[in-house]
Image: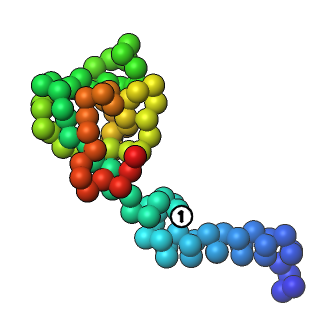
Amino acid sequence: MFGVPVRGMIVIGVLGVAGVMYAVNGGKQMGSDKGAEICKVTVTADILNVRSGPGDMQPIVSTMPRDAVTDAQARVENGYRMLSDRRWVSQSFVALTSDSTCK
C-alpha cells in the first residue's frame, strides 16, 4: 500500500496510538494515578530514622521529628512503609493522616 510494507504501517500505527494515549494522559503512564490515592503519614516517634531500604539493617539517610507529615506510598514491606521519595520508615512509628485513602 503506497509502497510501504504492511508491517511498517502496523508499527507506525501502534506508535501513533501510544503517542496519543501519552499526550491525553498528560505525559504520565496510563493507570499511574490509581484513582488519585492520597497517602500521607504523621511521625509518632520523638525522632524517626528514615532508611534507604525496608529493614533495620538498611542505612539511615535522614531523620524526621515528631508530628512531621510527609507523602507516602501504600507499599509496606517487612513492617516498613515506603515514602514518596523511595525512602523507608518503620510502620510502627507513623500513622496515616485522616485524609489518607491508602492502607
Q: Nearer the viewer, residue 20 or 40?
A: 40
Rendering quarter of residue 87: top left
**Picture quadrant of residue 9:** bottom right
Q: Is residue 17 left or right of residue 78?
A: right
> Image check: 98 left or right of 15?
left
The residue lying at 52 percent from left, 62 percent from top is 31
- Circle 1 sits on which residue? 30
Across and down, in percent, residue 19 comes to 57, 71
Is residue 88 visible in the rendered image? The answer is no
Asked whether residue 54 appears in the rendered view, the answer is: yes
Element on which disc 1 rests = loop
The answer to which image quadrant residue 56 occupies is: top left
Indicate the position of residue 71 as horizontal and vertical percent values.
28, 47
Label 1 Cα crowd, 10 Å radius (few <14 / some 14-19 / many 20+): few
The amino acid sitting under disc 1 is Met
4 shown above or below 58:
below
Looking at the image, which residue is at 38% across and 36% down?
A: 82
The N terminus sits in image quarter = bottom right
Residue drawn 49% across the image and 76% down it: 24
Which residue appears farthest toward the top when viewing the image? 57
x, y percent for residue 5: 86, 74
Q: How is the image coloured?
A: rainbow
